[in-house]
Image (cartoon, rainbow, N blue to C red):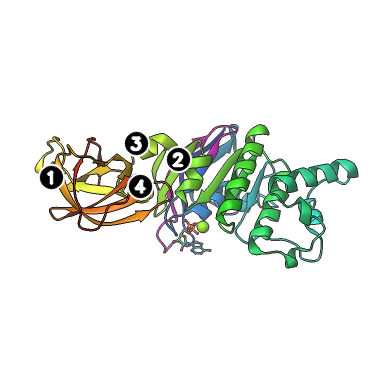
């Protein structure tokens, strides 16, 4: 188990903390994603875990052994981990295959080639094994650097925005193959992303950061069902954040009324003839399966999914079936 306790870190003492008393545990073989807006500390947290920065307070341990930062290690970076940063650190004068095999033992060359091929297959780069990295696109270079980490079969794999340079269709394939392979090999994975779909489809748990702080660390379903606050809710994309008390029967104190919203996801707004409220359609946009309908009720704008197009100005009726509230 990887255990992080009360971790604190700043790049320089004058600056506000880049990581602010963060604690969480990761079980062996678990896949964790770290999400949060740009500058929230995702990359820094990975660098701390891998041992590239010296934390100012707290503790990181792997299987109950405490891990130290670079000030205490001759070579920064813990042996049982691999870290794939956003700058891929490939050697341009040797082939893709040689890059992937760079840290593998030469003791059994056949075995080494098998390890290289297996890793390249996971990221769909086997065809380009003999190519030189400077002939590759950004996305291909990214996949080579991931393959190089996989080939070494680390116990913990730390990936910084691993899918950021891949186009959508390729991303879906590689994301699935990569996670399946790590699961099959019992590799613990922690990756950063700002795409919630990445986090949803691949992770056992999600860690949400804001300004270096942990906002929430929960199973994927739980994060959606009970987001810590409206910042977390908004990571899911379109949401309705409504005044408490207006569309449900909840009664909160006057103070809480202003500190909370009723959170309704667009697939939860029910447009139907017997709805409780009237609305007027602003527009409908096709989203691939359903239409995203924007409509108004009183002064409030809503978003809702609906299987059919609705024309601008159309009068509709709708209901809000849930009572979920979140902190502002
Ligand atoms: P994220 O990966 O979530 O975008 P980072 O971990 O890169 O966020 O950055 C967290 C905070 O630390 C930001 O405020 C950023 O400006 C700052 N920071 C990152 N790298 C450095 C650095 N090398 N020196 C000083 N400040 C840094
Ligand atoms: Mg980053």
In reply to whether residue 28 is colored magenta, the answer given is: yes
How far across and down, in percent of the image, does residue 213 sit?
A: 40, 49
SS of the residue under disc 4: helix
* Nearest to N terminus: mark 4 or mark 1: 4
Residue at the spot of label 2: 23
Identify the element where label 2 is drawn. strand
Name the outermost residue toward the left: 254
Gap in angstroms between the C-alphas marked 2 and 3: 22 Å
Nearer to us: label 4 or label 1: 4
Residue that carries the numbered disc 3 in the rendered image:
225
Residue 255 disc label: 1
At numbered mark 1, what does the secondary structure look like: helix, strand or loop?
A: helix
Task: Specify which label sits upstream in the sequence, 1 or 2.
Answer: 2
Tell me which segment is drawn in magenta.
14-31
Q: Is residue 41 left or right of residue 118?
A: left
* Label 2 or label 4, whichever comes before in sequence order: 2
Q: CA distance from mark 4 to mark 1?
A: 22 Å
What's the CA distance linking mark 3 and mark 4?
A: 11 Å
Q: Nearer the viewer, mark 1 or mark 2?
A: 1
Label 4 neighbourhood size at 10 Å, few (<14), some (14-19), many (20+)?
A: many
Instruction: Give the Cα separation between the discs numbered 2 and 4.
Output: 18 Å
């Amino acid at each position: 188990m990887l255990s992080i306790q009360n971790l604190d870190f700043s790049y320089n003492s004058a600056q506000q903390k880049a990581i602010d008393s963060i604690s969480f545990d990761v079980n062996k073989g678990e896949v964790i994603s770290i999400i949060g807006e740009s500058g929230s500390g995702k990359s820094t947290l990975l660098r701390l875990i891998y041992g590239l920065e010296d934390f100012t307070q707290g503790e990181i341990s792997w299987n109950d052994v405490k891990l130290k930062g670079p000030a205490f290690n001759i070579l920064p970076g813990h042996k049982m981990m691999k870290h794939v940063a956003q700058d891929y650190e490939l050697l341009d004068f040797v082939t893709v295959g040689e890059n992937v095999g760079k840290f593998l033992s030469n003791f059994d060359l056949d075995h080494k080639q098998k390890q290289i091929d297996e890793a390249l297959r996971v990221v769909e780069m086997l065809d380009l094994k003999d190519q030189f990295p400077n002939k590759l696109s950004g996305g291909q270079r990214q996949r080579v650097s991931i393959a190089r980490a996989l080939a070494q079969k680390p116990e913990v794999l730390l990936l910084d925005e691993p899918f950021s340079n891949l186009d959508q269709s390729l991303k879906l394939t590689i994301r699935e193959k990569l996670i399946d392979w790590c699961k099959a090999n019992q590799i613990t994975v922690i990756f950063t992303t700002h795409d919630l779909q990445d986090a949803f489809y691949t992770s056992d748990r999600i860690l949400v950061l804001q300004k270096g702080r942990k906002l929430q660390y929960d199973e994927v379903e739980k994060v959606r069902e009970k987001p810590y606050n409206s910042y977390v809710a908004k990571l899911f994309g379109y949401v309705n954040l409504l005044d408490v008390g207006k569309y449900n029967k909840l009664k909160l104190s006057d103070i809480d009324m202003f500190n909370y919203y009723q959170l309704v996801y667009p697939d939860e707004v029910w447009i139907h003839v017997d709805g409780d409220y009237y609305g007027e359609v602003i527009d409908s946009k096709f989203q691939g399966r359903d239409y995203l309908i924007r409509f108004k009720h009183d002064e409030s704008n809503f978003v809702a999914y609906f299987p059919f197009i609705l024309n601008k100005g159309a009068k509709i009726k709708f209901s809000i079936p849930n009572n979920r509230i979140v902190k502002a």
